[in-house]
Amino acid sequence: MNIFKKISNRLSDIIFPRRCVGCQEYGIVLCEQCLATLPSAVLTKQSFVTALFDYHNPIVKKAIWKFKYGNVRGLAKNFSEKLYDEIIGDLSDRLYITKNQTFLMLPIPLHPQRNRERGYNQSELIVQELIKRDSNHLFQFSPTALLRIHKTKPQAKSDKRRARLENLQGAFKANQKIVNGKDIIIIDDVVTTGATISEARKALLASGARSVRAYVIAH
Ligand SMILES: [Zn+2]
C-alpha cells in the first residue's frame, strides 16, 4: 500500500472511528456478541462448498462490504475464528485425515491489476489468519498454485447467467507442479451463484488436484 493510502486510512480512522457493524459499539469492527448472533447460511448449490453466514442478513452484508471494499481488514480475524472451527469440524466428519496429511489452502485470486487497485485480496487475508491458527500444520499456502489470468468484469455488472459464465471461462490457471495429487481447500468471502468457485475448482482438477472443497464466509 502506498504512503498516501496509509495516511488517508489512518485519518479516516480518526475522523470515523471503528464501530461494530452490528451494535455500533466503538473501537471494534465486529463484537463477539454480534458475531455470535449472525444466522447460518442455507446450503449452497454446489455440494463441495460450505458457507458460514447468511448473506441476506444486513449485518453480514455490511461486514462483508466493509471487508471487501472498505479496507476493514481486521474482519479477517473475526471471520476466520469461526471458519477455522467449521473447517476442522467438517474435515473430521467427512474425511479420514491420515497422519501427516496436509491440505493446500488457496484463496480465490484477484487479477493482479484488481489486486493493485484494491491493495489487498480479502480472501488471502482469511487464509493468512486460518494458517496462523493451524497449530497442527494441516494447511499450506502457495501464492502461485492458482492464478487469475483474465480480468473478469464484476459479476453484478454482467447479470445474465450465460454472460456471467462466459465472462469466467478460462479465468483461472492452476500450476500443475504444485497442485497435482493434492487435496485442496479453496477460501472465498462470498459465494452467490457459485460460478467463480466452480471455475476455479475446474482449473485445479484439470491440473491433477485429488480433491477440491471450498469454504466461504457468506452465501
Ligand atoms: Zn456488536
Image (tube, helix red, strand yellow):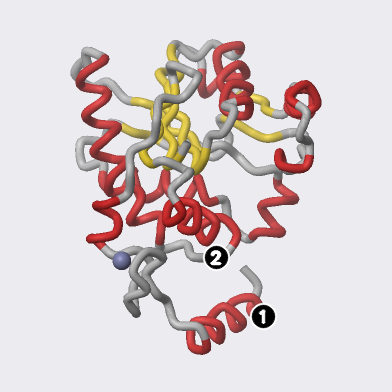
Residue at the spot 59% in from the left edge and 28% down from the top edge: 193
- Sequence-first tag of 2 and 1: 1
Would you place residue 211 above or below residue 90 in this image? above
Would you place residue 14 above or below residue 217 in this image? below
Mark 1 packing: few (<14 Cα in 10 Å), some, or many (20+)? few
User: Mark 2 to mark 1: distance in Å?
Assistant: 14 Å
The residue at which mark 1 appears reads as: 4
Residue at the spot 52% in from the left edge and 61% down from the top edge: 66
- Residue type, numbered disc 2: Asn
Query: Label 1 CB, ligand 1: below 8 Å?
Result: no
Mark 2 packing: few (<14 Cα in 10 Å), some, or many (20+)? some
How far across and down, in percent of the image, does residue 62 sit?
49, 58
- Residue type, numbered disc 1: Phe
Q: Nearer the viewer, residue 63 or 48?
A: 63
The residue at which mark 2 appears reads as: 71
> On the picture, is 15 further left or further right than 101?
right
